[in-house]
Image: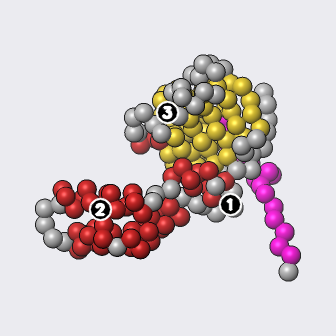
Amino acid sequence: IIEKLALNEIFLAEKDAAKTSWIGLEVDGYDHGSHRSSGIMVSTGTGSSGWLYGAKRITAQNIRGIANELIDTAGAETEILAALKEAKDDPNFAEQVASTISQSTQFDTGLNRLYYLVREPAHQQMSDEGFCDNIKLTSELCDGQLCIDGSIKYDIQYGDTVELDLRPEYRLKCIKFV
């Protein structure tokens, strides 16, 4: 058993980034089965403005593409269709929408929750991401690695488990100098 503190995030995946990662996922005591992806990231509030933000970020180009597709499939003129046309035609509007959506990824560092993200899942599932109080990852990896805050690394083999939670006694405390 290794006990470590993470400030920002942990990431579990195969060492070889070209290999698919198979990881069992249990969130708040509920078994979500095995996930096939490029890995699973679990972030604290402090880490939510870094790697998690980058992984979930929506761009203006994404918004314009979605708007184009929805306009093409929509049948009638509506207020929604007008907003979609604005998103398609006005880069500033698309950037504003993208920024608003992306900012929702960041959460308060004082929030006593974790956020997990199945990165690049092979099959989309409702359990691919969300807030949780605790999470258990079970390795089905051939030659895996657990990375803590981008610098601390542990080799992980098939059957190893990683259990994560937040404990009030380890909360980051900041001092504001005035």
Depth check: give the residue in front, 51 or 32.
51
Task: Report the magenta residues as a range.
Answer: 163-177
Mark 3 and mark 2 lie on one chain; the one further toward the N terminus is: 3
- Residue ID at (39%, 39%): 124
Secondary element type, mark 3: strand
Amino acid type, callout 1? Thr
Mark 1 and mark 2 lie on one chain; the one further toward the N terminus is: 2
Tell me the crowding category of disc 3: few under 14, some 14 to 19, or many 20 or more residues within 10 angstroms, Cα based: many
Q: Which residue is mark 2?
A: 67
Q: Which residue is mark 1?
A: 109
Amino acid type, callout 3? Ser
Judged left or right of residue 73, residue 147 is: right
Q: From the viewer's perspective, is the residue at label 1 or at label 2 nearer? A: 2
Q: Which residue is mark 3?
A: 37
Give the quadrant of the C terminus: bottom right
Depth check: give the residue in front, 16 or 177.
16
How far is the residue under mark 3 from the one under mark 2? 27 Å
Can see residue 89? yes
- Residue ID at (44%, 68%): 95
Give the quadrant of the N terminus: top right
Secondary element type, mark 2: helix
Is 168 in the magenta? yes
Amino acid type, callout 2? Ala
Q: From the viewer's perspective, is the residue at label 3 or at label 2 nearer? A: 2
Q: Position of residue 118 (x, y in %)?
A: 51, 40
Q: Main secondary structure of the magenta part?
A: loop
